[in-house]
Amino acid sequence: MLKVGVLISGRGSNLQSLIAACAAPGFPAQIVCVIANKVDAKGLDHARSAHIPTLVIPHNAYKNREAFETALEAALEQHEVQLVCLAGFMRLLTQWFTERWRDRLVNIHPSLLPAFPGLHTHQKVIAYGAKLTGCTIHFVRAEMDHGPIILQVAVPVFADDNEEILAARVLQAEHKAYPAALRLIAENRVNVFEERTFITGATASSDLLFNPKA
Ligand code: GRF
């Protein structure tokens, strides 16, 4: 069983999808702690309902990033965490931390990276007129929304979408993608070589997603 720590800042719907996946019989990972950098992170309730230990490490109580990350590190060590999943965690992590957790630190971003990194993703996708977007699970490097891609799911963008509608469609994909990526990692099937991942025994899908339909 891979011991997972999940870091959140807010709503925690991706956390909830990971909790649900881990609860299924035979799932190869377990969430051993959920850490929020905000005391009012709603996602903490999901963890509490599932009887998962929670911790709040408020970043603004520390004098700098290093001090904050040292506290984070101590908590992860205390729970013997082997893999860290960022799930709507809204703090940039320093190179010290991302290197300490190199290839053991995963993030979910609501676009097909490297397109549309950063905040206000869906707004940028709509403004650009992209016809497809999606979500990406990747190993974390110090540069924001950057690092070897583990898994992506494509989602169509429709002409009358607004930010909210598109976000909801992508979120549905996120809730399938994150548990699937976690399973691959926990089954030791994800290997990083020269900053690309190679997945053992993966069935490559050759389905084409046209939008608009050609
Ligand atoms: C998700 O869209 C995720 O991709 C992004 O932040 C959002 C978090 O949502 N990094 P939730 O807190 O998991 O509901």
Image (cartoon, helix red, strand yellow):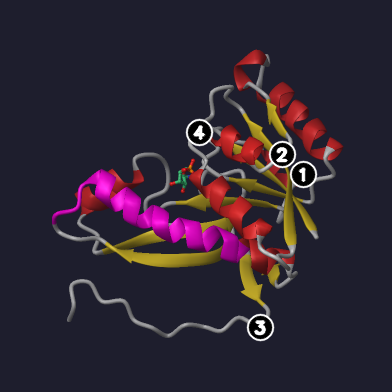
Q: Could you give the CA–CA distance between mark 1 and mark 3, rounded to whole angstroms?
A: 28 Å
- 128 or 202: nearer the eye? 202
Q: Residues within 10 Å of mark 3 (few under 14, many from 20)?
A: few
**Three-letter amino acid code at disc 4?**
Gly
Residue 192 in the image: x percent, y percent? 68, 67
Q: Is the shortest distance between ligand 1 and the CB of mark 4 under 8 Å?
A: yes
Q: Which mark is residue 157?
A: none
Q: Is residue 10 magenta?
A: no
Q: State which tag comes first along the sequence, 4 or 1.
A: 4
Q: Which mark is residue 201?
A: 3
Give the main secondary structure of the magenta stretch. Answer: helix
CB atoms of marks 1 and 3 within 8 Å: no
Residue 176 in the image: x percent, y percent? 49, 62
Which residue is at 37% across, 51% downward?
116
Residue 178 in the image: x percent, y percent? 55, 58
Q: Which SS class for mark 2?
A: helix
Which residue is at 72% across, 51% downward?
102
Q: State which tag comes first along the sequence, 1 or 3.
A: 1
Q: Which image quarter is the C terminus in?
A: bottom left
Read off the residue under disc 2: 97
Read off the residue under disc 1: 100
Disc nearest the viewer among 3 and 4:
4
CB atoms of marks 2 and 1 within 8 Å: yes
Q: Could you give the CA–CA distance between mark 4 and mark 2, rounded to whole angstroms?
A: 21 Å
Instruction: State the extent of the magenta-drawn residues as a range.
Output: 160-181
Q: Could you give the CA–CA distance between mark 2 and mark 1, rounded to whole angstroms?
A: 5 Å
Q: Which mark is residue 10?
A: 4
**Three-letter amino acid code at disc 3?**
Gly
Which residue is at 20% across, 47% downward?
162
